[in-house]
Amino acid sequence: MKTLKATYQIVTPMFIGDAEQKATSIRPPSIKGALRFWWRALNWGGFFGTNVEDSLKELHEEECRLFGSSEIDGKGGQGVFLLQVISNVTPLQPENLINQYPLQNQNGYIYLLGQGLYTRQQGQVIYQRSALPAEKTFTIKLCFRKDIDESIVKTLLLFGLMGSLGSRSRRGFGSVSIKSLTGYDKYKIPENTEEYKEILIKLCKNLPCDLPPFTAFSEKSRIDISMIKGKKEKVQNILNDIGNEMNTYRSFKSKKIEFQDDHDLAYDVSKGIRVSEHPRRVIFGLPHNYYLSSGKKVDVKPIGKERGRRASPLFIHLHQFPDNSYAAIQFLLPSSFLPSSDRIEIKSGHNANQIPHNVDWKVIHKFLDRFSTRTNII
């Protein structure tokens, strides 16, 4: 067997959970799920043809060949490699997590945490779940039955350049940075932002021009280095800065209100008025809620077959270089927002409006443009 080993460092607290939502370890199914996600995102362009359904079928068949699949209609198998995770990371319980990553005066960080990871008790903000701490490392070992597949090598790299694990992974938590790759000498691990940009451009070649049917790279994708921070900076402060910027952009309480129309629409729904449009902020992901000063609540969610959410197409990733400096990466991977038959429901009490979706990608581009120190990669 030929072996690949990739070692990664955890950069931000990783809220990865077992069946009881407790952070205990990094398990192979979590890794394989993440690798499959990045493999699909990177390789869609190589399968995309005139018929989307046929392209999706071919992509799925190749994914099953590489990663394995369950037994269906006499087909199935283990894939072309065996996967092992080598890790010895001790989780931080909520009471210890608060000491290492305090929540006082960290409104932007709390904003990115989102509901479920923190709560308020007696005026104090505390964590609700345990997490794997930053600075720790883990290794993925792949043993190939035959030759090493280069698309898997690229996937391991991409996971270590843009990936993360656990809850709120699209908001910067659980970010990982690749530290070494042995068993395949074609690619070099980036040591600075220039090398980081070079390898990403090399990996993201020949992208399709059309909007993908799922989260994948295309010519409509955007990858920015939003800010670069020195080795003395705390990762919590970096996430706090990004969270504050996002909260300011999306909030009705900011000095420059970007979404007055969304606010007015929510109030109309709360008053029982029928509306024909959905909020522009749905582009950041669904569901989301409006808690109005009147005391009423407005819920916004997708309505479709077995669908209750739409993950955000905007990702935040913190990358740590060997000199311990950081790059805050934000990237947009546009795709079909929802199936054409789905609707977006805006509901308050008994007043429910189901609206055809018509999203505006410029809403996220405008947010990314707010970072004056940004450098665009693609």
Image (cartoon, rainbow, N blue to C red):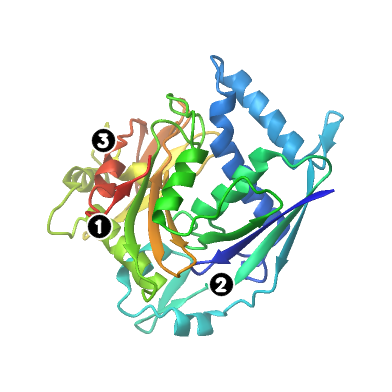
The residue that label 1 is drawn on is 292
- Specify the farthest residue to the right: 74
Q: Quick one: which residue is furthest to the top in this view?
A: 50
| SS under mark 1 | loop
Q: Is residue 227 visible?
A: yes
Number of the label disc, if any, that sits on residue 111:
none
Residue type indicated by callout 1 = Leu
**Residue name at image x 35 percent, y 64 percent:** 111
Q: Residue furthest front?
A: 185
Q: Secondary structure at mark 3?
A: loop
> Residue 331 vs residue 375: left or right?
right
Residue 244 to residue 348: above or below: below
Above or below residue 15? Residue 336 is above
Mark nearest the camera among 3 and 1 is 1
Residue 286 appears in view: no
Mark 1–mark 2 distance (CA, rounded to whole Å) = 33 Å
Return the mark for residue 274: 3
Q: Earlier in the sequence, mark 1 or mark 2?
A: 2
Q: Earlier in the sequence, mark 3 or mark 1?
A: 3
Q: Position of residue 36 (x, y in %)?
A: 64, 43
Direction from residue 72 to residue 279 in the image, left or right: left
Nearest the eye: 200 or 371: 200
Q: Nearer the viewer, residue 55 or 295?
A: 55
Upstream in sequence: badge 2 or badge 3: 2
Residue closer to the observer: 299 or 283: 283
Q: Alpha carbon of mark 2 to alpha carbon of mark 3: how far?
A: 44 Å
Q: Which residue is mark 2?
A: 131
Q: Residue at x 53, y 60 (%)?
A: 177
Foreground: disc 1 or disc 2: 2
